[in-house]
Image (cartoon, grey):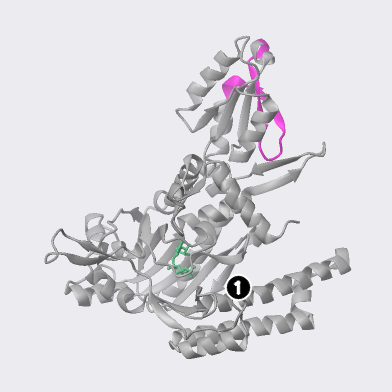
Amino acid sequence: MANQEDVFKKVISHAKEYGYVFQSSEIYDGLSAVYDYGQNGAELKKNIREYWWQAMVQLHDNIVGIDAAIFMHPTTWKASGHVDAFNDPLIDNKDSKKRYRADVLVEDYVAKIEGKIDKEVTKAAKRFGEAFDKEQFLATNGRVKGYREKAEAILKRLGKSLEKEDLADVKALIEELEIVCPVSGSKNWTDVKQFNLMFGTQLGATAESAMELYLRPETAQGIFVNFLNVQKTGRMKIPFGIAQTGKAFRNEIVARQFIFRMREFEQMEMQYFIKPGTQQEWYEAWKEKRMNWHLSLGMGEANYRFHDHEKLAHYADAACDIEFKFPFGFKELEGIHSRTDFDLGSHEKYSNKKLQYFDPEENKSYVPYVLETSIGLDRMFLAVFSNSLQEEELDNNTTRTVLKLPAVLAPTKAAILPLLKRDGLPEIAQKLFNELKWEMNVAYDDKDAVGRRYRRQDAIATPFCITVDHQTLEDETVTIRHRDSMEQQRVKLAAVKEIITKAVALKEWLGRV
Ligand code: ATP
C-alpha cells in the first residue's frame, strides 16, 4: 500500500495529466490556492453541481433555486457578523516564518492520534483474524481508550478556548502538546492572532464615489436578503427552501491541500425556512437526507462520518459536518447548521425592513428559523476524484490506472470505437456517435489498438466503451465494455442508447437511497 502522501500526489498529477485540474496562471508560476478546471474537470464539476441541484430543487416541490450576485451591499456583511467575527486564529513560527491556522495545528495533532488508533485496529485485526470484532476492540482496548480520551480532551479544550476567544490558551495548548513547525521543526511560536478572511475591493470609478465592498465569503447571504422576494413571488409556504450554487472567496491563511482549501471556490447551499421550535426535527431530517445523497454515489459508507461541532459559529444553535475520508484523512466535506433566526433577524435590524412570514395556520407573523446545508463543490470534486482513482493489478501481471467515477458524474458517458478504420466500421460507429451525442457527452476514438483506447478511456473515467467490429456487419451487434469490471457484453446496436441512458440516469443513482 502506497502511503497517504504518495496517493495524494498521484491524485494531483492525474488531475493535471488528464485535463481535470490545472494550477491557475501556470505559465506565470501559478497563483497560490487558485485552480482552473480543464476540459474534463469542467464537465465533472458541472455534473456534480447538477446532481446536487436536481436532488435539492427538482426533487423537492418546496425548494427553488436562485442565482444572486457576488457583490452585495457592504452592510450585508456587518449584519451577517462577517466583518466582526469571520476570523481564523493564526500563529507564525518565528524560525521558518511560516503562518499556520492555530486550530488546524491542533487538529492535525489529533489526527495523528487517530492514525495511531487505526494502526492498533489494523494490528489487532491481523492478530485475531476472522474473530475480530472492531467495535468491541475499540470499546475495550486500554491503549485505544487512552488515545481516544486524549483526543477528545484536546478537541474539547480547543473548542472552549476558541468559543471564549481565549487565544492565549490556544497558544498554551500548542505549547503543552509540544507541536513543532512542520518546516523548521521548532517550537518557537508567536502569539495567536485573529485574521479576517474577507477580500475587500472597491466599486466605482472615482476615489470620492468609491464604495468599499467585499467579495462574498459565502453564498448564503444572497439567499437571506432575497427571502421575501422569493417567498412572495413564489407564493412559498413554510417550510420551504431556497438553493443556490456560486463562487465564494476567502483569504485563507493556510491554503494547501490542492482544491480542498482554495481562495476562490464554489459553494452549493440551501437554506430551509422553518417554524421556530421545529429546528431540531429539521436538523435531523436534513442530516439524513444529505448523508443519503452522498451514499447514493456508492463510494462506501465507511468513508463518511458525522462530526458534531464543539465550537458553534455565532449564528448557530446546532451544527455538524459530514466528513469524508480524503487521502489526508477524515475532513469536512459539508456543513449542516441550524442557524435560528440570526440572519433574518439581523438583516431586519440593519435594513429596517420587516423580513417576516405570515403564517396562515397560526394567524401570526414571525421571523422564520433557518436550517442550512452547505457543501463545497470543489471539495466534493476532490472527494469523488480521489476516491475513484485506482491502480489495479491485472491477471496478466500488468497494472491499469482507472478513474472509477460514478457513471452519473463521469464527464464522458461512452466512447465509440470502430475496431478498424476500414471495412465500413467507421461509418457505423460514426452513425452511433451522431445518435448518442443528442443524449449525452460521447467520444469517438479510432486511434491506436483497441486495448490502448480502453486504457485511455479508463484513465479519464468513461464508464462504457462501445466497439464496432466485423460481427457488427453480420448481426448488427456491438460490444459494451464496462470500465470497472472490464467485462464485455454483446448487445444489439439498436439497444445501446437505452442501456447507457438508463445506466447514467438520475433515478438509477439518487433513486436507490
Ligand atoms: P473549514 O473549517 O474547512 O475552513 P468552514 O467550516 O469554514 O470550512 P463553511 O463556512 O461551513 O466551511 O463552508 C461550507 C463548505 O464550503 C465547507 O463544508 C467546504 O466544503 C466548503 N469550503 C469552505 N471553505 C473552503 C475553501 N477555502 N475551499 C474550498 N471549499 C471550501
Say how many tags the image has. Answer: 1
- What are the residue bounds of the magenta stretch? 474-495
State whether residue 187 is above or below residue 417.
Answer: below
Q: Is residue 297 visible?
A: no
Drawn side of residue 209 relative to residue 16, left or right:
left
| Residue farthest front in this picture | 95
One can see residue 417 in this view: yes
Q: Is residue 475 magenta?
A: yes
Q: Is residue 315 magenta?
A: no
Residue 89 lies, in percent from the top left, at 45, 79
Residue at the (56%, 41%) spot, across then down: 18
Q: Amino acid at mark 1?
A: Pro
Residue 348's x, y, as percent? 22, 74
Q: Position of residue 33 (x, y in %)?
A: 46, 59
- In the picture, measured across the screen, residue 358 lies left or right of residue 209, that is right
Which residue is denoted by mark 1 in the rendering? 182
In the picture provided, is 372 more to the left or to the right than 308? left
